[in-house]
Image (tube, grey):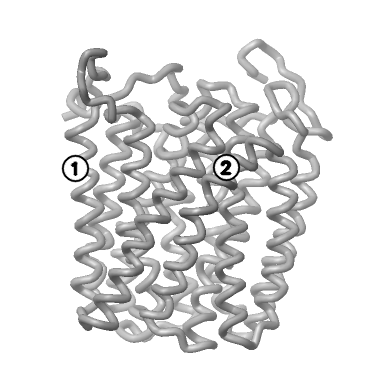
Amino acid sequence: MIDFLRSRPTVPSESAPATWRRPEVLLLLMAAAVPLSFATWQALLNNFAIERAAFTGAEMGILQSLREVPGFLAFGVVFLLLLIREQRLAYISLLLLGLGTAITGAFPTVIGLYITTVIMSVGYHYYETLQISLSLQWIDKKKAPETLGRIIAVGSFASIIVFALIWLTSDILALDYFWIYLIGGGATMAIALVAWLAFPAFPQQVEQHKTLILRKRYWLYYALTFLSGARRQIFIVFAGFLMVEKFGFDVGAIALLFLVNAAVNVWLAPKIGRLIGRIGERKALIFEYLGLIGVFTAYAFVESATIAAGLYVLDHLFFALAIAIKTYFQKIADPADIAATAGVSFTINHIAAVLLPAAYGFLWLISPPAVFLTGAALAAGSLLLALNVPHDPRPGDEVMVGRVPLAGPAAAE
């Protein structure tokens, strides 16, 4: 089995007609597979949890903390790469994501939802870690921002299909949660199997380190990643919960809201990628964090369902600018560090994500506005860090203040 998982890479011969069997196409296909499960899980979660499992904000906070534990343990990807090739591990992760989603509707209890969420989350977070690593390895630096934008756009297009089908199946056909979860998860598993069988194992241009790596000169990247994870939890967990609990959005309305988000991303994400390539990571991140300060402050005091929905779309749009964190790292990194650092950075991203949702769940019971005001504070901290990103980041020029000198040609400390 281990020999099969780590079999030597093969690529199509130059005379082969299947020119679509390229790394970029595989990345786009897998990007489309993820939302079929995760968008289904996300769109149904608040209503399923409240209606079937009698969740309050406290249980929701605990569930979201459990969901982030696999993300916190994403550094384990590095050790799995000793046994399984990176590309095949991505396929296995997609299969787990689909499985966890497919069985969610069969366990409408607090404990059942906790367990299926963890299964789904292991697949999701390990795939996302690997997707970042493979993208930064396979895509040229000059094309990376635009290509990453296209990956977001493809995922968003798949999300549009999911949200439209959820609206159709829940509001028109009145399908039970069980069947909707089963269809979404099953579709992801089917695409993962097709990708595994149809695409060759692409060779690595640079052999990746298979040990945990923390480099002092990456400190700004780590800090931006940490605050991004903390801030994003407020959006993922409590912005949607606000729509259901305070403004009474049903499944169809939530699905429609997600559909609008996805439609905007299909059109705008590639443009955002091109914009980042043109203006640079520093300006893109500063713009993102200024916008998020305003959005989170507005969340705290909004009383109109229409305005709240508008904030939700705007919030989601600003997060697309987080492409700049990935391309910033690609520019400053030793190419051999990418896989190991992707796992470590995902863990850093989820340190706060594991702890904050449960804590915020209890804070929500006392003061929902306080939850969003802390999000504005986190965005302000990110803004200060973004001011330290150089105009032209590269190895040896990773920050404007607090630079760590290179000790060798390979950027070793």
* Tag 2 residue: 273
If the image is split into quadrants, where does the N terminus sit? top left
Q: How many marks?
A: 2
Residue appearing at x 40%, y 37% in the figure: 77
Residue appearing at x 31%, y 71% in the figure: 113
Mark 2 vs mark 1, CA separation in Å? 30 Å
On residue 193, which mark appears?
1
Residue 284 visible in this rendered orientation of the protein: yes
Q: Image quadrant of residue 110?
A: bottom left
On residue 5, which mark appears?
none
The residue lying furthest to the right in this view is 401
Amino acid, disc 2: Gly
As drawn, is 175 to the left or to the right of 282?
left
- Pick the residue in front: 256 or 110: 256
Residue 27 location (% of width, % of height): 37, 38
Q: Is residue 380 above or below residue 22?
A: below
Residue 380 location (% of width, % of height): 76, 58
Q: Image quadrant of residue 22?
A: top left
Amino acid, disc 1: Leu
Residue 298 location (% of width, % of height): 70, 75
If the image is split into quadrants, where does the C terminus sit? top right
The residue lying furthest to the top in this view is 409
Residue 66 location (% of width, % of height): 43, 63
| Dot 2 and dot 1 residues touching (CB under 8 Å) | no
Residue appearing at x 55%, y 41% in the figure: 345
As drawn, is 131 to the left or to the right of 174?
right
